[in-house]
Amino acid sequence: PPKTVEQVRRLVEKDQVAFIFNILGTAPNISVRKYLNSKKIPQLFTAAGASTFGNYKEYPWTIVLQPSYKDEARIYVEYLKKNKPDAKIALFTGNDAAGKDYVDGIKEAMGPELAKKMIVAEATFESTDPTVDSQVISLQASGADTLFVHAVSKWASMTIRKVYDIGWMPLFILSATGTSVSGVLAPAGLEKAKGIITAYYLKDPNDPQWANDQGYKDWLAFMKKYYPEGSTGDQLNVYGYTMAQALVQTLKQCGDDLSRENIMKQAANLDIALPMLLPGIKIKTGPTDYYGVQAQRMMRFNGQTWELFGDIIGEN
């Protein structure tokens, strides 16, 4: 976050940029939000889904497109209510604003009575932790038969590996932030990730069902031309491409008026079905709706790729 503040101030005050686009991470986005809003500079499409980034009343210059963590958490709660109503749940999240958002979302969706009954253990990790072994062992000892994990990159990989290695076999729900096959699951061991479920809104580039899909083919051609060293198995490369397309659409809608006011106005006036969104899911924003994607589908990892199941959940 301190680096974010330093670099964003330089971009605004020295380079005089029109807007800031797709800062990665909850804490870095929060660190500059007040500053950007006070300067009336659009903070477009935060690469973090904390529900606070859709707060159009307090921060009218900040907008998010990816589903909020609380919306995602609600999907998992609805799934458990239908499929495992007697679940004993362990929550394992980062000790940060994003992790707190997931936990709050789960507890809000359950209500206090159900949360007290179903959640049997909670643990967190720090971004500086060298391993998550002690937390995973502690959560297993709670008697939980269902594990929800919010983590990114190596912390998600370490958790998946440890759960498997100690022979724990809970129903494993992984937040969408940790679902990259090449970036998270492969380092953990694909076999160790088998059976994990999640919710998502973009096409998985590893899923063979998209092989003849035009949107997927166009993305593949883009990767080959502009980012040949990038992994075509990494969902984050689909995410970056899709956010960039949303930005292009925003700028097209601006026409000849590229004032900051109009850029923000158009960012909050999108209604588009982009090629790498799952069929039936759209990006839709409005002056009082700063959450671009509010629909997702459940999917399960089969040891090689994510398999979609069920219908679209959430508003579109």
Image (cartoon, rainbow, N blue to C red):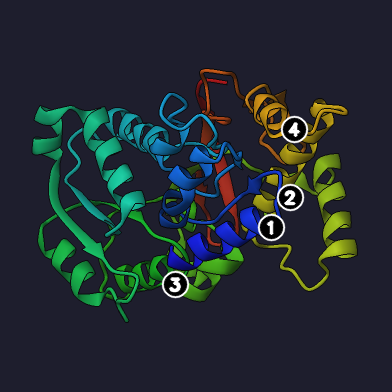
How would you rate the neighbour count of disc 4 (Cα within 10 Å): few for under 14, some for 14-19, many for 20 or more? few
Q: Mark 2 vs mark 3: which is more N-terminal?
A: 3
Q: In the image shown, does 112 or 181 lie closer to the viewer?
A: 112
Q: Are marks 4 and 2 in contact (CB under 8 Å)?
A: no
Q: Which amino acid does label 3 sit on?
A: Lys
Q: Position of residue 298 (x, y in %)?
A: 49, 38
Question: Looking at the picture, does residue 119 appear above or below residue 60?
Answer: below
Q: What residue type is labelled 4?
A: Ser
Q: Is mark 4 on a helix, strand or loop?
A: loop
Q: Mark 3 vs mark 4: which is more N-terminal?
A: 3
Of circles 4 and 2, the one toward us is 4
Of circles 3 and 4, the one toward us is 4
Of circles 4 and 1, the one toward us is 4
Q: Distance between the residues labelled 4 and 1?
A: 29 Å
Q: Which mark is residue 241?
A: 2
Q: How far apart are marks 3 and 4 (CA)?
A: 40 Å
Q: In this view, does 218 lie to the left or right of 270?
A: right
Q: Are marks 1 and 3 in contact (CB under 8 Å)?
A: no
Residue of label 1? 237
**Residue positioned 72% across, 37% down in the render:** 246
Residue 250 sits in quarter: top right
Residue of label 3? 154
Q: What element carries label 3?
A: helix
Q: How far apart are marks 2 and 1 (CA)?
A: 6 Å
Q: In the image shown, does 13 or 159 lie closer to the viewer?
A: 13
Q: Which amino acid does label 1 sit on?
A: Asn
Q: In the image shown, does 88 or 51 lie closer to the viewer?
A: 51
